Image (cartoon, rainbow, N blue to C red):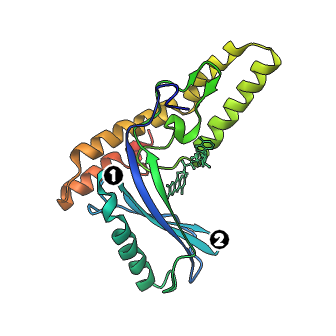
Amino acid sequence: MGQWMNSTNLKFMVALQWRMLLSRPHDSTDVYLEPQYRGGYAWLFPRGKEVNIGVGVQQGCHSQLPGLVKDFVQSMISRGLVPDMPPRAVTGGLIPVGGPLPVTGKGNMMLCGDAAGLTHAITGGGIMNAMVSGLIAGRTAARAIKEDDLTILQQYHRQWSDLLGNFLKRAARQRQIMDQKWSEQPAEFNKLMRQTWIGFDHNHR
Ligand SMILES: Cc1cc2nc3c(=O)[nH]c(=O)nc-3n(C[C@H](O)[C@H](O)[C@H](O)COP(=O)(O)OP(=O)(O)OC[C@H]3O[C@@H](n4cnc5c(N)ncnc54)[C@H](O)[C@@H]3O)c2cc1C
């Protein structure tokens, strides 16, 4: 649909993750920032008795992903977090990280979630924003039908934008800095992560 509207994502992170059984309870959501995960990071996201263990990297580095995930899982096995067993499931795909698209509606079409670029450009998280934008689009469509007025759909872009726009645009700017300054040099890398990643105080302001 984005192609019909001439509005598509151009920049992506590519991600691969294993779903595994946890060997012991693990409540925290863990993020691993290392120079080898170029333009991305590794994660451990618990989900009850299971855990998603994955790695995301910038698009050009996708061929390294299977090896990076295997090594990362191996380190979690060594720490006793997961058993030395094959994954229960493997998932992967492209995550848009270029920021929200400037055009998310045209005629009777509305783009939501990933199709609208509504993922967080640093973390790649997009589930909540997909749900929120989908809800707004659904409500807007219902009003347009009820009032028999398609022009009401034009309000969709501003509505999601008022809620998420600044937050997501800021993340896209942080991503640009991250991509430009990525460094294998530990001190520079450390500084860059603090400058760009959410979770560090100044990035919450
Ligand atoms: C490996 C990986 C891990 C991730 N982990 C997280 C996470 O932990 N937390 C988080 O917040 N986000 C995460 N994300 C991002 C998150 O998955 C997406 O942001 C979110 O799923 C976007 O939802 P969506 O509905 O916009 O798109 P999707 O979930 O991609 O859904 C789009 C649906 O449309 C269908 N479709 C596509 N084209 C057509 C067509 N022409 N006709 C009919 N159907 C079509 C697709 O098959 C799909 O089912 C992850 C992404 C990846 C790749």
Residue at figure coordinates x 35%, y 56% from the top left: 57
Residue at figure coordinates x 38%, y 73% from the top left: 72
Q: Pointer 1: what residue?
A: 58
Residue at figure coordinates x 28%, y 41% from the top left: 177
Q: Number of marks in the image?
A: 2
Q: Residue furthest right?
A: 146
Q: Pointer 2: what residue?
A: 48
| Residue 194 as seen in the image, left or right of residue 84 | left
Question: Where residue 50 appears, x then y in whole percent?
Answer: 60, 73
Quadrant housing residue 69: bottom left
Question: Where residue 30 appears, x then y in whole percent?
Answer: 47, 65
Q: Kindly check if marks 2 and 1 are in contact, taking CB atoms under 8 A apart as contact.
A: no
| Residue 182 as seen in the image, left or right of residue 70 | left
Question: Where residue 20 appears, x then y in whole percent?
Answer: 55, 75
Image vertical order of residue 163 relative to residue 125, above or below: above
The quarter of the image holding the N terminus is top right
Q: Amino acid at mark 1?
A: Gln
Q: Nearer the viewer, residue 51 or 148?
A: 148
Quadrant housing residue 183: bottom left
